[in-house]
Image (tube, rainbow, N blue to C red):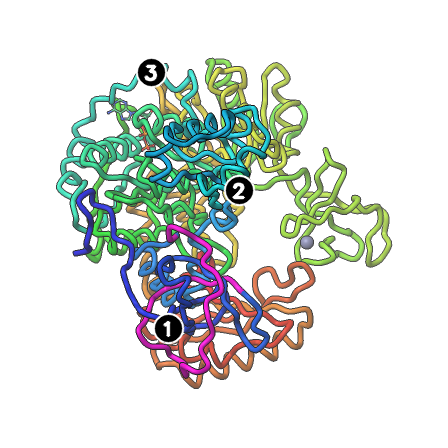
Amino acid sequence: SRARDDQGALFAVEAEGPFAGVVFNRPMERVFSYAIPGRLRPSLRVGQRVRVPLGRSNQPVTGYVVRIDRTAEVDPGKVKEVLEVLDDPPLIDGVMLDLTRWMAGYYACSWGQALDAVVPAGVKKQAGTRIASCLTVPEEVRLARDTLALPPRQAEILELLCKAEGTLTVADVCRMAKCTTAPIASLRKRGLVHTVKRRMSRAPVPGPLDPPSAEDDHDGKAPIALTPEQADVLGRLDPSLGGDAFATFLLHGVTGSGKTEVYLSAIERVVARGREAIVLVPEISLTPQTIRRFRRRFDRVAVLHSHLSDAERHRHWRAIAAGEIQVVVGARSAIFAPTRRLGLIVIDEEHESTFKQETTPRYHARDVAVKRAQLEEVPVILGSATPALETWANADRGKYTRLTLARRVAERRMPRVDIIDMRLEKPGKGRPLHAIGGLMRSAMAEALDDDGQVILLLNRRGFHTFILCPKCGSVLKCGGCDVALTHHKERHKALCHTCDAEYDPPERCPSCKFDRLHYGGIGTERLEREVREAFPQHVIRRMDSDTMRSPGAYEQVLSAFRARQVHILLGTQMIAKGLDFPDVTLVGVVNADTSLHLPDFRAAERTFQLVAQVAGRTGRGDRPGRVLVQTYAPDAPAIAFAAKHDYLGFVAQELPEREQKGCPPFGRAVRLIARGPNEAEVVAYLDSVAGLLRELADPSVRLLGPAPAPVMKIKHLFRYHLKLLAPSPAPLQTLLRAALPMAEPSQPIELAVDVDPVSL
Ligand code: ADP
Ligand code: ZN
């Protein structure tokens, strides 16, 4: 068991010796030894960042101290010295060192790269702080101050300094004593005060973290009485809460079954036992509604969302590290929150692919969470209505403990879901509609007449989703990417959704100059127009990344919807997740097929999850809900099972297919992606990598490719990939460790290694 002090805090790593082992945010595996000069001996510790000279040029660079040694790994005559210590106290504790070392091994990056990902930029920059000259009074002066014969101004200042609570800067004293710096300088000259450089917060007094708003209090703090099912689940979690034992729970609960309520109750017990909790939610679920639920129940909640400034992030991080926070709620990177007495980790919507980071280190926050929980010896709860098949399989294998909430709270029923076969659909009454068929349209009218609210999901933004030349057949693409342009009518632009390049909508085909281009496909912007024309009496709002660009827009639309000032809310997957509005009686899925045909082994799983999640947005109040799903593939199992709310049926259908293909959760996958400006060079390079891998691989490893990546060109860089599949992670890790150092590309080609890729 890990050593904890009497408050349960983890000890910083204690080590002594004349050499520091330093790693860098670069793809270098080695730990470099540096001599610690005498002046830095007292302050240098493991977990700090330091400036050290690197390479032949001796360029000073920043690195992380990962150990302190009695011996150097290089010839002691050649060892270089640490130049400067950047942090005090250390940024990284023992658990984070172990966790990042594990990440480096598992995700095939360097230890330094993993460490650099763990510390937020605002913390590294010490954002929101400045170096100030602070004044201190030596103890003997403090005691003898009444006996000193000083000019009145200086005596006044000395008195002020002796009585002050906390440290005063020169500027503080000038302000408080209404003086210039001259009397302070005289005091210094006499040796009666000293100045020291200290890092101070820029904000004069660090205010309370995001004070609760009036809205936070309106339903009081009283916890809801749990249903018998919830109480049972909590009873099974309880022995692990606030203790010192690692355990992983899968909380499988249908939408609206009260999972969040279970998390809140579990966290309450953890907090009551003097521990802290980390709650990860997908960025999209960091809704005011969710946050309010946490704020109502706990006094000290830190919310880490993507709109924080560097200074705010830094302030939260320090508050968490100081043990001032009970609950940290945040997206992916909150898994690295520097809690002092962690007692529980919760991952809500654990199946979400946004928990996967798509830059080095390409970690999955759910898997990192399980590892962190293991290192910290605490429980972790993975919650979902539609668990990832990997998680499900881990529960089947007995690695995770499965807990089930099979029913919605308050006797609410799961909504009825009807599938609409769009091949048979007639256009709606009146003006023919493109996006919405007749059945959907009449169901919407009925729900609205009944005073219900409607949510429509279409997972594509823009007006038209492609521009085609009917003469030569070419689809207009971005100049830099192999991606079809989307027409955004409101902005009068054709956009690349991959690199955000904007083009004027072309009048002629760039290839054959034909001037009657065909604009086709339906995005949310066009859906909005159709719905406005069909329901002119109703208030409609669109929610996608085009309309939600200004900060606060999301919150504003949601509160208008809650207040029933909006009748129809339509949008991309932004509206599919987590929302809880009791008056929504109809959810319409405009096109369930958008993700079904992607070349990805997870396409069916994604489709199932999206349909099941959006269906969960209705029937959450006293009135029953209804769901209509428009599709051209009504027999696709993903859609048929989602319509029946049949997760188990879907799993029973999908797992054997995965097993047959050797795809996760049966075996592990790694994807290597090479990119560069010259296609032939990229192909030649990846061919050579493939050759090397074939030579070194264990026979259990299967290698597929090289082949063009699904998006073959992004920002003028060609992309090819290679896939590796194996029955277990070990042979893949061994192979990567052996091959990668020999496979390093030369500029300008780059290689990315994606372990457990979310799409393949
Ligand atoms: P989930 O996270 O599984 O979707 P929630 O925890 O959000 O479910 O619960 C769905 C709704 O039911 C919420 O409005 C919540 O306040 C309410 N709720 C949850 N548990 C209870 C309970 N025991 N009694 C009454 N209402 C509850
Ligand atoms: Zn582009």
Q: Is residue 439 visible?
A: no
Where residue 456 appears, x then y in whole percent? 52, 30
Magenta range is: 61-90
Question: Which amino acid type is marked by label 2?
Answer: Arg
Task: Let me know if residue 148 is in the magenta part.
Answer: no
Tell me, yes or no, whether the two marked residues, 2 and 3, touch with CB atoms within 8 Å: no
Q: Provide the residue designation for mark 1.
A: 732
Q: Secondary structure at mark 2?
A: strand
Q: Residue at x 49, y 21 (%)?
A: 559
Q: Which numbered tag is attached to residue 219?
A: 3
Tag in front: 2 or 3: 2
Nearest the viewer among 501 and 621 is 501
Distance in Å between CA atoms under marks 3 and 1? 53 Å
Q: Is mark 3 within 8 Å of ligand 1?
A: no
Q: CA distance from mark 1 to mark 2?
A: 47 Å
Q: Nearer the viewer, mark 3 or mark 1?
A: 3
